[in-house]
C-alpha cells in the first residue's frame, strides 16, 4: 500500500456533543465519506477534510462494511474514537488500481509520525443472540490457542479480533497453559460479555525475540468501546468546582459539580471515578493524598476519569484504565490541538452581535400548520438506533415552510408531547394522530446545543412573549390577502411539490445518499 498511507486521527468530544462531521455513503461513490465538517469542531480541528474516507474505526477495517455497522461502531466508541482516514484523491487512485487498503504492511501516519503497532490488544466483546462470531483453534501437542472463523462484521471482528490472534488472557486470567476444553468452558461461563488479551503473529514474534512476557499493561486499549476521559482544567476564582468523595470498594468519586465551573466545562460528570491526577495513578491513595495531589497541580490540573460503564469494563478485564493514558501521545508537539485544548485557543473573530439579540436567539419555535392535499411539506429524518429527529426537505411555500420550519430543525415536541427520546415510528404516529393539523416545538441545531449545554430543558416556557412562528392555515392566508388589499388576486396555480410524506432515514437502493451526524 505504498503511497497510500492513511492518517490516524483521534477525536474527543464532550458528552452530549458531536464529533463535528457527517458520515455518508453516496450513490456511485466508494467508501464512507466525511462530509459537512463543523467549523471549529473536533474533526475539523484534528485535520479531517471533506471527502476523506474512513478506513478503520478504533483499528477495525471498515471500508467494506455496511454503513449502518460503521455508524454503530462510531456511536459505541463513546466520547473518544480513533480513525484511519485517507484523502479523496489517493483513495480513488487506490480503488482504481485495486490496492488492498486493509494491508497491515502499510505504515499509517499518526499526526505526522509513524504509528507504533506492535502491542498486544485488549478486546471487549458483548454477546449477541448469534454468539460472539469466532471459534477457538488449538493443535494437539502444541502450546497455544488461536482465534479462527472470525465472522466478518460479527461481534469479534468489530471488537478487533483477527484470525490467528493468540489468546493470552480471559477477563484478566492467563490461559496460556489451559487446555482447549478449559478455555471453552471459561468463555461459556463468562456470561454476556468478555475481555480478551490477544496478540497477533507479528507482535507475538516481536516479544518472543525480546524474551519479554506479554501482559495487559503492555496492551493497546484502542479497540475497547468505552474510553476513559482526560479532563484538563484551569482553576477559576472558586476553584475547580467539584467535590471528591472516597467510597469504599469503589474509589475516589466526583460529586456536586457546579454548573458553569471549570470541571463542568472540561467534561467532568457526577459519579466519575478518578483514576489518575497529572498522570499519577491514585487508586492506592487516601482521600487526603488525592486532595493534596490536586492542590500541588497549581492552577491547572489533568485528571483521568472513567464513568460507570467504562470502569466496569476495565475491572472485568482486571486491567487499569492507565493503559489508555499510557497509550496516548500526550506530548506530541506536532499534533493538532485536541478538542479540549482548542477550547482554550483564542476565539475566531466573529461579527459583533448585540447581547440582547443573542439572548433572543436562544429560543425554540412553535410551528403550527394545517395539512394540505400534498401533505405538510417536509421530511422527518432520524439517525438509526439513536434518539433525535430532524426536519429535512422543507417544501418552499408548503405548510411547513409557511409555519416557520427550516432545514435541520430539531424536533422537541409534537402536538404538546416531548419527542426527544421517542423512536422514529412513535414520532411519525404522533404526527399522523393529529389528523389534519400539526403543532411542533423545534429548535435549530445551534440553539438546541447551547440550551442543552446550559442544562436548560427546552419547553414552551422559553418562548416568552412571542409564542410561536407565524401560523398559516387556509383561513389566515385569505385574511392576509384581504389585509393587503388584493381581494381580486386570482388563486395561485398549484405548484409542483416533492412528496410531503414523513419518511425515516433508510438504507435502500433508491436513495441517492444517506448520512449520519457525529
Image: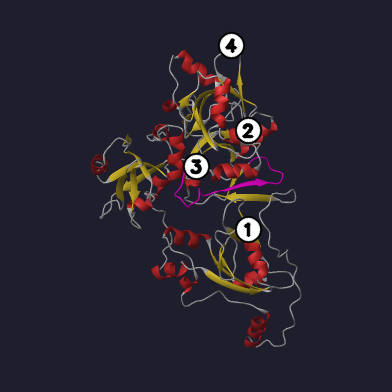
Depth check, mark 3 against mark 2: the one in front is: 2
Residue 515 place in picture, x, y as percent: 62, 50
Q: In the rendered image, which quarter is residue 501 located in?
A: bottom right
Is 485 rendered above or below residue 257? below
> Which is more N-terminal, label 2 or label 3?
3
Where the N terminus falls, by quadrant?
top right
> Which is more N-terminal, label 3 or label 4?
3
Q: Are marks 1 and 4 in contact (CB under 8 Å)?
A: no
Q: CA distance from mark 1 to mark 3?
A: 33 Å
Is 141 rendered above or below residue 295? above
Depth check, mark 1 against mark 4: the one in front is: 4
Q: To which residue does mark 4 refer?
A: 141
Residue 6 place in picture, x, y as percent: 55, 33
Helix, strand or loop status at disc 1: helix
Q: Residues within 10 Å of mark 3 (few under 14, many from 20)?
A: some
Is there any visible trace of residue 5 in the rendered image?
no
**Nearer-the-camera pick, 315 or 289:** 315
Q: To which residue does mark 3 refer?
A: 47
Q: Are marks 3 and 2 in contact (CB under 8 Å)?
A: no
Q: To which residue does mark 1 refer?
A: 424
Q: CA distance from mark 1 to mark 4?
A: 56 Å
Depth check, mark 4 against mark 3: the one in front is: 4
Q: Residue at x 68, y 50 (%)?
A: 513
Residue 236 place in picture, x, y as percent: 28, 53
Q: In the rendered image, which quarter is residue 60 located in?
A: top right
> Which is more N-terminal, label 4 or label 1?
4
Q: Are marks 4 and 2 in contact (CB under 8 Å)?
A: no
Helix, strand or loop status at disc 4: loop
Q: Is residue 442 magenta?
A: no
Q: Which mark is residue 133?
A: 2
Depth check, mark 1 against mark 3: the one in front is: 1
| Stretch of the chain drawn in magenta | 10-31
Amino acid at each position: 500500500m505504498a503511497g497510500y498511507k492513511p492518517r490516524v486521527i483521534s477525536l474527543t468530544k464532550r458528552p452530549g456533543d458531536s464529533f463535528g462531521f457527517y458520515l455518508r455513503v453516496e450513490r456511485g461513490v466508494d467508501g464512507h465519506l466525511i462530509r459537512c465538517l463543523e467549523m471549529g469542531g473536533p474533526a475539523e480541528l484534528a485535520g479531517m477534510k471533506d471527502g476523506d474516507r474512513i478506513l478503520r474505526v478504533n483499528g477495525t477495517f471498515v471500508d467494506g462494511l455496511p454503513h449502518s455497522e460503521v455508524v454503530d461502531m462510531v456511536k459505541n466508541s463513546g466520547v473518544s474514537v480513533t480513525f484511519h482516514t485517507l484523502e479523496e484523491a489517493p483513495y480513488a487512485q487506490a480503488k482504481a488500481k485495486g490496492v488492498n487498503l486493509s494491508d497491515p504492511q502499510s505504515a499509517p501516519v499518526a499526526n505526522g509520525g509513524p504509528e507504533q503497532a506492535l502491542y498486544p490488544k485488549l478486546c471487549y466483546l458483548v454477546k449477541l443472540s448469534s454468539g460472539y462470531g469466532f471459534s477457538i483453534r488449538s493443535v494437539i501437542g502444541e502450546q497455544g490457542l488461536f482465534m479462527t472463523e472470525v465472522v466478518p462484521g460479527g461481534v469479534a471482528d468489530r471488537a478487533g479480533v483477527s484470525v490467528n490472534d493468540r489468546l493470552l488472557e480471559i477477563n484478566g486470567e492467563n490461559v496460556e497453559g489451559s487446555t482447549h476444553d478449559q478455555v471453552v468452558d471459561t468463555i461459556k461461563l463468562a456470561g454476556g460479555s468478555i475481555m480478551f488479551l490477544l496478540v497477533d503473529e507479528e507482535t507475538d514474534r516481536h516479544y518472543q525475540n525480546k524474551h519479554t512476557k506479554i501482559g495487559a499493561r503492555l496492551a493497546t486499549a484502542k479497540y475497547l468501546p468505552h474510553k476513559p476521559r482526560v479532563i484538563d482544567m484551569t482553576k477559576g476564582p472558586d476553584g475547580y468546582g467539584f467535590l471528591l468523595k472516597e467510597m469504599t470498594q469503589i474509589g475516589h468519586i466526583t460529586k456536586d459539580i457546579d454548573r458553569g465551573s471549570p470541571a463542568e466545562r472540561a467534561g467532568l460528570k457526577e459519579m466519575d471515578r478518578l483514576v489518575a491526577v497529572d498522570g499519577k495513578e491514585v487508586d492506592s491513595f487516601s482521600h487526603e493524598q488525592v486532595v493534596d495531589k490536586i492542590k500541588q497541580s497549581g492552577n491547572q490540573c489533568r485528571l483521568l476519569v472513567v464513568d460507570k460503564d467504562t470502569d466496569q469494563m476495565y475491572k472485568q478485564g482486571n486491567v487499569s484504565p492507565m493503559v489508555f493514558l499510557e497509550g496516548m501521545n500526550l506530548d506530541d508537539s506536532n499534533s493538532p490541538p485536541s478538542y479540549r485544548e482548542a477550547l482554550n485557543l483564542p476565539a475566531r473573530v466573529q461579527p459583533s452581535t448585540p447581547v440582547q439579540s443573542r439572548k433572543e436567539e436562544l429560543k425554540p419555535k412553535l410551528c403550527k400548520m394545517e395539512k394540505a392535499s400534498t401533505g405538510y411539506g417536509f421530511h422527518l429524518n432520524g439517525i438509526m438506533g439513536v434518539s433525535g429527529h430532524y426536519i429535512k426537505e422543507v417544501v418552499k411555500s408548503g405548510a411547513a415552510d409557511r409555519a416557520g420550519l427550516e432545514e435541520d430543525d430539531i424536533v422537541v415536541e409534537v402536538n404538546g408531547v416531548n419527542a426527544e427520546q421517542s423512536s422514529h415510528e412513535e414520532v411519525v404516529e404522533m404526527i399522523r394522530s393529529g389528523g389534519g393539523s400539526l403543532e411542533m416545538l423545534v429548535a435549530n441545531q445551534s440553539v438546541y446545543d447551547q440550551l442543552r449545554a446550559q442544562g436548560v430543558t427546552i419547553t414552551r416556557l422559553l418562548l416568552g412573549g412571542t409564542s410561536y412562528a407565524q401560523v398559516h392555515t387556509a383561513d389566515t392566508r385569505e385574511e392576509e390577502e384581504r389585509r393587503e388589499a388584493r381581494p381580486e388576486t386570482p388563486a395561485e396555480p398549484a405548484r409542483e411539490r416533492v412528496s410531503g410524506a414523513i419518511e425515516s432515514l433508510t438504507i435502500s437502493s433508491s436513495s441517492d445518499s444517506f448520512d449520519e451526524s457525529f
